[in-house]
Amino acid sequence: MENGWGLPESVIFCKRLKQIGVDLIDCSSGGLSPLQKIPVTPGYQVPFAEEIRKEVGISTGAVGLITEAAQAEEILQKNQADAIFLGRELLRNPYWTLSAAKSLGAEISWPPQYDRAKI
């Protein structure tokens, strides 16, 4: 596609997806082409999730350097997205959800075999 695929095209596409029963959109700009010039900063893809959520009226998942529990919570509290999808952060720290819950003051169940190793 000449000049690439942008947010306006994604909104149109997501409206059609909603019509056929899709109920959640994973919002990522890809980043697979060396021709893309996407500034990579914490939460850099969240605006895509927020815009699609607003324009389409569909649940969205935000991605893009979401690494801190407070950052994830803020995205959800501001209704910028309905879910947080973690990729690289979970590869670096597979126990992220456990430490995030602790930092936010949430009580969650731990696997029994981890009980003696709680943080």
Image: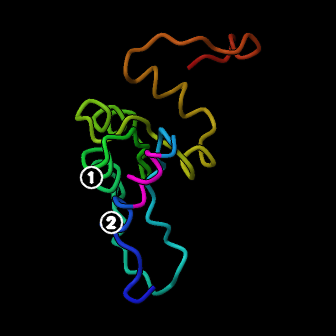
The residue under the point 40% across, 43% down is: 60
Horizontal and vertical percent position of residue 19:
44, 46
Question: Which SS class for mark 2?
Answer: helix
- Magenta stretch, main secondary structure class: helix
Look at the picture and state if 105 lies above or below 96.
Answer: above
Q: What span is in magenta?
A: 13-19
Question: Which SS class for mark 1?
Answer: helix
Horizontal and vertical percent position of residue 61:
44, 43
The residue under the point 35% across, 50% down is: 49
Q: Outermost residue toward the right? A: 113
Horizontal and vertical percent position of residue 77:
26, 29
From the viewer's perspective, is 109 left or right of 49?
right
Going by the numbered disc 2, the residue's amino acid type is Leu
Q: Which mark is residue 51?
A: 1
Quadrant of the frame with the N terminus: bottom left
Going by the numbered disc 1, the residue's amino acid type is Glu
Of 69 and 114, nearer the camera is 69
Residue carrying label 2 = 7
* Occupied quadrant, residue 69: top left
